[in-house]
Image (tube, rainbow, N blue to C red):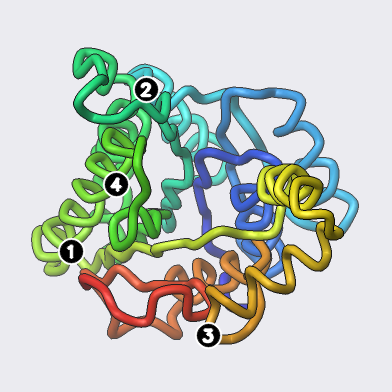
């Protein structure tokens, strides 16, 4: 198993990618502490992991709350003894308002989740990683950094800042044996994209399956939209010893939706 005997914190565990990451980590042998705002989701994912023989715990965590960030790290150390891996998977997309019409004061809410939360979790986890001269941090990022859409000003700006922070952290923490990387994710097959597809398909008089096939062929070099489980495997790779020479990188895991972009 790729993560045997490792202890991981995964924030932002919802029904999509966060869930897939937590399940993949447990499958690969890690003890997983999950954090999110919705307790019902945490309970559900924990039950899945338990049923498959994994080791899991959870704590309600709003990453925009500094106290919650400290508390989940403390709870992890108390339960499992240390922190080897931190995955920052929480996100907030904002209100989709054009930049010229947006209330910049509201951008703080987006930055609190997408940038400040990950920063606080890093600050709380790094002392434990440094003490053992080993740690792996993976920041789940967005293709909005590379190819954004109207209305995503706050989201794209906060995720761009997270990408830059990933590079700086890699340089600051490398001598302590701590690797820091990010993953640019694309659209993924899930409830949100399928609900959107159903609306578009209805307008065009086609099935959602036909819409998805056409979109996949048009936008993805591999001819398919990835699923959350596909992206979770990339996060496992970055958290494992297989990527021991990789740090300071923001990797596009997107089935070729964008084949070039900033690294």
Residue under the image location 16 percent in, 60 percent down: 173
Question: Horizontally, is 9 left or right of 196 in the view?
Answer: left
Of residues 142 and 74, the one nearer the viewer is 142
* Mark 2 → mark 4, Cα distance in angstroms: 15 Å
Residue under the image location 24 percent in, 38 percent down: 123
Asked if residue 262 is positioned above or below residue 9 in the image, the reply reads below
Where residue 183 sits: x, y (%)?
A: 40, 64
Q: Are marks 2 and 4 in contact (CB under 8 Å)?
A: no
Which element is circle 2 on? loop
Quick one: label 3, few (<14), some, or many (20+) residues within 10 Å?
A: some
The N terminus lies in quadrant:
bottom right
Of circles 4 and 3, the one toward us is 3
* Mark 3 → mark 2, Cα distance in angstroms: 36 Å
* Mark 1 → mark 2, Cα distance in angstroms: 23 Å
Q: Specify which label sits upstream in the sequence, 1 or 2.
A: 2
Residue tagged 2: 64
Of residues 230 and 41, the one nearer the viewer is 230
Q: Are marks 1 and 3 in contact (CB under 8 Å)?
A: no
Of circles 1 and 2, the one toward us is 2
Where residue 143 sits: x, y (%)?
A: 39, 59
| Residue 159, numbered label | 4
Where residue 196 sits: x, y (%)?
A: 68, 44
Residue tagged 1: 170
Which element is circle 4 on? helix
Residue tagged 3: 221
* Mark 1 → mark 4, Cα distance in angstroms: 17 Å
| Quarter where residue 107 is shown | top left
Q: Specify which label sits upstream in the sequence, 1 or 3.
A: 1
Of residues 161 and 87, the one nearer the viewer is 161
| Quarter where residue 231 is shown | bottom right
Quick one: label 1, few (<14), some, or many (20+) residues within 10 Å?
A: many
- The residue furthest right is 51
């Amino acid at each position: 198993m790729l993560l045997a005997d490792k202890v991981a914190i995964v924030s932002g565990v919802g029904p999509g990618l966060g869930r897939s990451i937590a399940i993949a980590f447990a499958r690969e042998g890690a003890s997983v502490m999950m954090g999110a705002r919705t307790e019902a989701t945490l309970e559900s994912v924990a039950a899945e992991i338990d049923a498959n023989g994994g080791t899991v715990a959870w704590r309600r965590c709003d990453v925009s709350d500094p106290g919650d960030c400290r508390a989940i790290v403390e709870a992890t150390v108390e339960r499992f003894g240390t922190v080897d891996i931190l995955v920052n998977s929480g996100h907030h997309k904002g209100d989709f308002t054009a930049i010229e019409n947006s209330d910049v004061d509201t951008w703080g809410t987006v930055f609190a989740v997408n940038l400040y939360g990950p920063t606080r979790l890093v600050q709380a986890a790094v002392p434990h990683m440094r003490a053992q001269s080993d740690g792996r941090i993976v920041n789940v990022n967005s293709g909005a950094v590379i190819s954004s859409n109207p209305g995503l000003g706050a989201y794209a700006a906060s995720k761009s800042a997270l990408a830059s922070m990933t590079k700086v952290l890699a340089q600051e923490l490398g001598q302590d044996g701590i690797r820091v990387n990010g993953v640019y994710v694309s659209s993924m097959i899930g409830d949100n994209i399928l609900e959107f597809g159903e609306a578009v398909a209805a307008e065009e008089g086609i099935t959602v399956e036909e819409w998805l096939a056409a979109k996949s062929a048009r936008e993805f070099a591999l001819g398919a939209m990835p699923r959350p489980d596909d992206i979770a495997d990339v996060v496992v790779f970055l958290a494992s010893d297989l990527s021991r020479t990789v740090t300071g990188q923001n990797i596009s895991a997107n089935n070729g939706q964008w084949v070039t972009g900033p690294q």
